[in-house]
Image (spheres, rainbow, N blue to C red):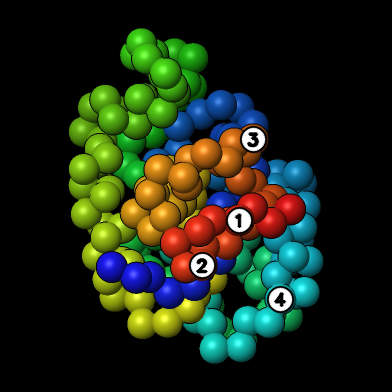
Amino acid sequence: MPHPELYILRHGETMWNAENRMQGELNSPLTEKGRRDAARQGAILAALDLAGFTFLSSPQGRAFQTAGIALAGVADRIHTDERLREIGVGDWSGRLRDELPRPKGKDPFLAQYEIAPNGEGFARLKLRCRAFLADLSGPAVLVTHGITSSMIRGLVVGEKAHAIQTSHGGQGRIFHLKNGDQFLLE
């Protein structure tokens, strides 16, 4: 299924990101670095022609705070969509990652999202992201979260979405998805 052109932003660094805590449904404010991350994204977007684009954000505070900074002067209106929220981590919300079990495998930190007690898990996240993408009617700028961004990008461009390595899932950067390809804007 072809998808519209997308620019995907991850929220800027938060206090809990800096502390290496699982956030999930909970929220912590952006750090000064996080506000700089969002401003950097705004500078990238300001140089683009975004006529005809819709601007959508996760309603979670850290993403909406990022959207307010990154989209200032770019978007007249920012819509929120619950489906752009971060993967739920259930009982592990607010917990330090180093205190949690670390499954064996290629990416033990990523695997923590799948095994979090009472968490959402990747299968349900995938369904949520598919439904979101199916409802898009045109090009959009999305402000979301690291795991949700990764899932959306994987659904749109396939495995090559994960070939680009970024620190902290792209904070301060933008993923551009067009015609089945992904580009990293820094």
- Residue 127's image quarter? bottom left
Residue at mark 1 to residue at mark 3: CA–CA distance: 15 Å
Q: Please, what is the three-letter code of the amino acid marked with disc 1? A: Phe
What residue is disc 1 on?
183
* Residues at circles 2 and 1 in contact by the CB criterion of under 8 Å: yes
| Badge 2 or badge 4: first in the primary sequence | 4
Residue 152 visible somewhere in the drawing = no
Residue at mark 3 to residue at mark 2: CA–CA distance: 22 Å
For mark 3, give the secondary structure. Answer: helix
Q: Is residue 151 above or below residue 15?
A: below
What residue is disc 2 on?
178
What residue is disc 4 on?
48
Res 167 label: 3
Q: Is residue 169 left or right of residue 87?
A: right
At a point 73% along the width and 80% down the height, the residue shown is 73
Q: Is residue 175 above or below residue 22?
A: below
* Residues at circles 3 and 2 in contact by the CB criterion of under 8 Å: no
- Residue 91's image quarter? top left
Q: Is residue 132 left or right of residue 71?
A: left
Q: Please, what is the three-letter code of the amino acid marked with disc 2? A: Lys
Residue 140 visible somewhere in the drawing = yes
For mark 2, give the secondary structure. Answer: strand
Residue at mark 4 to residue at mark 3: CA–CA distance: 24 Å
